[in-house]
Image: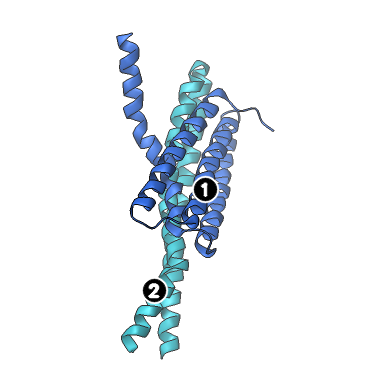
Amino acid sequence: MLELAIGIILGCCALGAGMAMIAGIGPGIGEGNAVAKACEAIGRQPECKGAVTTTMLMGCAIAETTGLYALVIAILLIFLAPGRFVNILLESIR
Amino acid sequence: MIKLDATVRRESRYIAGWVLVLSLVMEAVFLVIGQWDYTVLLGNLLGGSVATFNFLLMGMTVQQALEKEEKESKDFMRTSQTLRTLMQFLAAVLGVALPCFSIPATLIPLFFPRIAIAFRPLFDKKSADNSKEV
């Protein structure tokens, strides 16, 4: 029974980490679209290249943070959460 | 080796400067709360260097993507983002798995570029005001 409970905890942590990483899809799509539009803008007004690049860089960095939040949550769920949860379970049994 | 655009170089320098400043602040906070040891320093070095390198790589990608066709640039940016996320993941895993790195000191610096960008409008406004006065 204890093995089953530990297995469920580990499985749920892995599932949670996988689900958290779904958020990593968004920034990729967003950045791709932003760059495509920036290409269009530079094609129309080549003299604005510097300003467009600066705005692009900042925008991409902000968009990427969302993915980074998910990444950190996933790492914590994989490496730290299982140990803590199993400890809590063992302590409650004792 | 591609030649870095002046804009990319300037922005990367700005981010690197802020990462350095925020790293020092973080070290000071760890010292004040009495949690500082060499693992904090190593974790900070790992996280800070990965965050700065990630921004530099992103700048290089944007620079190259802007010279491509619209469709091609979209795919190029997505591939780059995936690979950069993988790099950050590996760095974070190293920070968490190896005992010589402090976990929070490795993970927190990954967000420093975002904080630097949040501060940017304040300084831009200040420099714009100064130039108006001159």
The C terminus of chain B appears in which quarter of the rendering? top left
Q: Amino acid at mark 2?
A: Arg
The N terminus of chain B appears in which quarter of the rendering? top right
At a point 39% along the width and 79% down the height, the residue shown is A87
Number of other residues with Cα within 10 Å of mark 2, as a class: few under 14, some 14 to 19, many 20 or more? few
Q: Are marks 1 and 2 in contact (CB under 8 Å)?
A: no
SS type, badge 2 = helix
Mark 2 highlights which residue?
Answer: A84
The answer to whether B99 appears left or right of A80 in the picture is right
Q: Colour of chain A?
A: cyan
Camera-near label (1 vs 2) is 1
Look at the picture and state if A39 lies above or below B100: above
Towards the viewer: B90 or A13: B90
Q: Chain of mark 1?
A: B
- Report whether residue A12 is seen: no
Look at the picture and state if B15 lies above or below B129: below
Query: Residue B25: horizontal and vertical position, in percent?
Result: 38, 43
Look at the picture and state if B53 lies above or below A73: above
At a point 51% along the width and 21% down the height, the residue shown is A49
